[in-house]
Image: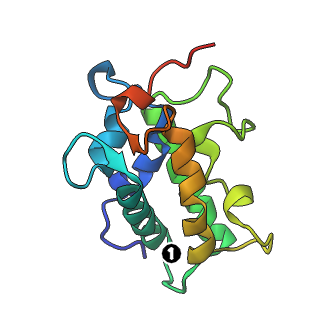
Amino acid sequence: MIRLFPIAGALALTATLALAQQGTPGAHFIDAWDLDGDGQVSLAEATERRGDVFAAFDADEDGVLSPEEHDLFDEARANDMRDHGIGGSGGGPGNRHNPANCMLREVTDADGDGQVTREEFMQAVPAWYAVIDRNGDGTVTAQDFGRRGN
């Protein structure tokens, strides 16, 4: 059974490219991941929230996302992406450079055994965060979202 962690918050991980609430780029992500309400998401906040995401989908609480649990995670993420208009513009599922794809099983399953341990899941956070932090200033804000320049 999925724990009480708000699934909406868990699913917000996909908001890395979102044009969310009232058309504000990244608002969905900032709202869900900015734990101290300062308008920016630090690596520490992203790491804490990623731990919550893992816990929400580790239904049997064994510290491993089985293929079935990870499939539920992927499905929930895909639904959240669809619901928030994420996708298109060359950022589809096959694009490993799309920040929304940086937590796919093939990325997080470091040892390739078909299961993702909490350690593997969490080790992927800094690289995922760096992709979202487009200006490289160490914090994720609304300025890190929206259209990319050519």
- Mark 1: secondary structure: loop
- For the N terminus, the image quarter is bottom left
Q: Seen from this angle, which residue lies furthest front?
A: 137
Image position, residue 131 (x, y; %): 57, 41
Does 13 sit above or below residue 44? above
Image quadrant in which you'd find residue 53: bottom left
- For the C terminus, the image quarter is top right
Image position, residue 13 (x, y; %): 46, 49
Q: Seen from this angle, which residue lies furthest left?
A: 37
Residue kind at label 1, given as amino acid type: Asp
- The residue at the point 50 percent across, 43 percent down is 79
Image position, residue 146 (x, y; %): 45, 22
Q: Which of 5 and 51 is in front in this view?
A: 51
Q: Seen from this angle, which residue lies furthest top?
A: 150
- The residue at the point 63 percent across, 19 percent down is 89
Q: Seen from this angle, which residue lies furthest right?
A: 112
Q: Nearer the viewer, residue 19 or 84?
A: 19
- The residue at the point 29 percent across, 28 percent down is 21
Q: Nearer the viewer, residue 75 or 126?
A: 126
Drawn side of residue 142 relative to residue 107, left or right: left
Q: Name the residue under label 1.
A: 58
- The residue at the point 74 percent across, 58 percent down is 106
Drawn side of residue 66 relative to residue 73, left or right: right
Does 126 sit above or below residue 114? above
Does 137 sit above or below residue 148? below
Does 84 sit above or below residue 68? above
Binning the other alpha carbons within 10 Å of mark 1 as few (below 14), some (14 to 19) or many (20 upward) gives: many
